[in-house]
Image: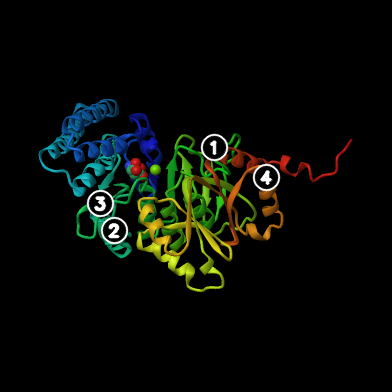
Amino acid sequence: MKFGGTSVGSPERIKSVVNLVNDGKPKIVVLSAMSGTTNSLVKISELFYAGNNKEAIAEIDQLEDKYKTVINELYSTEENRKRASEFITRHFNSLRNFSKSPFTYIDECTVLAQGELFSTTLTWLYCEELGIDSVLLPALNFMRIDRNGEPDSYYIREQIGRELKLYPDVKLFITQGFICKGANGEISNLKRGGSDYSASLIGNAIDADEIQIWTDIDGFHNNDPRYVKDTKAIRELSFSEAAELAYFGAKILHPASVWPAQEADIPLLLKNTMEPEAPGTIISSKTVTEGIKAIAAKDNITAIKIKSGRMLMAYGFLRKVFEVFENYQTPIDMITTSEIAVSLTIDNTVHLDKIIRELQLYGNVGVDRKMTIICIVGNNIMHSKDSISKVFKALKDVPVRMVSYGGSRHNISILTDSEHKLEALNQLNKYLFTDRGNRHNRPRRN
Ligand code: ASP
Ligand code: MG
């Protein structure tokens, strides 16, 4: 069971999490940092990098004060307040020490790791206070990534198995999401939002019956609730549908957390901590329902067009183009081609200038920024005859820059200018999820 930042965001929330997990069933609880903490730690790191030690320490003081308040409210005995305070103080003091020497990447990872160390230690101490038998498992003893930044599945499985064997009678384990060791044993992490990934990797490693991700919304919604009114929670998704939705913008789940569950065929359940009885979304291999299920949007997309007479009837052209992106480790999201041009999209623009320069060797290159991919997802979307026609009807007034259809059976992707996103999401919602979209097909009753 993984709980996100808001779910452990205050003493009250921590108490309800403990209440929720304390049901006697064996489980590993994976916690994120309390909400706001990782952002604050990122800021502290940036200030240290910039040599702005005074401001870094001011930010550290402020964060420490916040934790002092949490400790006072969370525990009822002086003894526990003291234990928690000692732990917190020791860690905050070690953060202040980073002002004494040049700040390195390892230092940054050490700073970023504190949030999860705090939330898990405080939660575990609270279990102690209630007399709940639990063990705090250090994620750094078993979570590891390799040289490519990929999880070292074999190591994780071995090590967590070894750790758990030490406590044959314990039912409740608490561990940190997000943090891990790197290939050389140095401290590292699974990147922002990585606690979901931790939970899913752990579920895979221990062959869990279920992986539960607890957040502050009742599962995946059929459209983005930030931009569209009356969206609905989706009860069931297949792994592929969930992977597409998570990747293309639905912020609720870290996209990488789908594959470990899928690989081990473990159902992945998304639940709402604020409403634990609500069914949430279940992602599993048993989901076979077909048709359009959800729409998601991913912003900050850059479209690149390479137009070349030389592409005409040539082979090897696309390979050369793709090689440029490979050399700069830049993933491509969408592609469309015509006989003389290829358009594709990227979301990581760190190497864009160099990429463009190399692509110019092969033809004219055009770049469109501030684009949005709108992704329409559903099992066998291709076989439901009217899906694509409904999508085009919905988008009749939206300038569409690219369309990708047929890449998989369960996805239609549309690229448009970000300024048209709101309209596109709402029009699609109307045509795909309400009967208003079908109305004009029916004979008029006058
Ligand atoms: N605390 C980390 C973050 O804010 C990891 C997570 O919450 O998943 O990115
Ligand atoms: Mg998260």
Could you say where residue 340 lies in the image, as x and y percent from the top left? Answer: 56, 64
Kindly identify the amino acid type of the residue bearing the numbered disc 1: Pro
For label 2, the residue is: 145
Q: Which mark is residue 225?
A: 1
Q: Which mark is residue 394?
A: 4
For label 3, the residue is: 188
Q: Quadrant of ligand 2?
A: top left
Could you say where residue 263 lies in the image, as x and y percent from the top left? Answer: 44, 63
User: What is the number of callouts on the image?
Assistant: 4
| Secondary-structure class at tag 1 | loop
Name which residue lies at 14% across and 40% down.
Answer: 98
- Counting residues from the N terminus, which is met first, the one under dot 4 or under dot 1? 1
Is residue 23 visible in the rendered image? The answer is no
Kindly identify the amino acid type of the residue bearing the numbered disc 4: Ala
Could you say where residue 374 lies in the image, as x and y percent from the top left? Answer: 55, 48
Kindly identify the amino acid type of the residue bearing the numbered disc 3: Ser
Could you say where residue 10 lies in the image, as x and y percent from the top left? Answer: 34, 30
* Residue 338 quadrant: bottom right
| Secondary-structure class at tag 2 | loop
Q: Which mark is residue 338?
A: none
- Label 4 packing within 10 angstroms: few (<14), some (14-19), many (20+): many
Q: Do the residues labelled 3 and 1 touch (CB within 8 Å)?
A: no
The residue mark sitting in front, 2 or 4, is 4
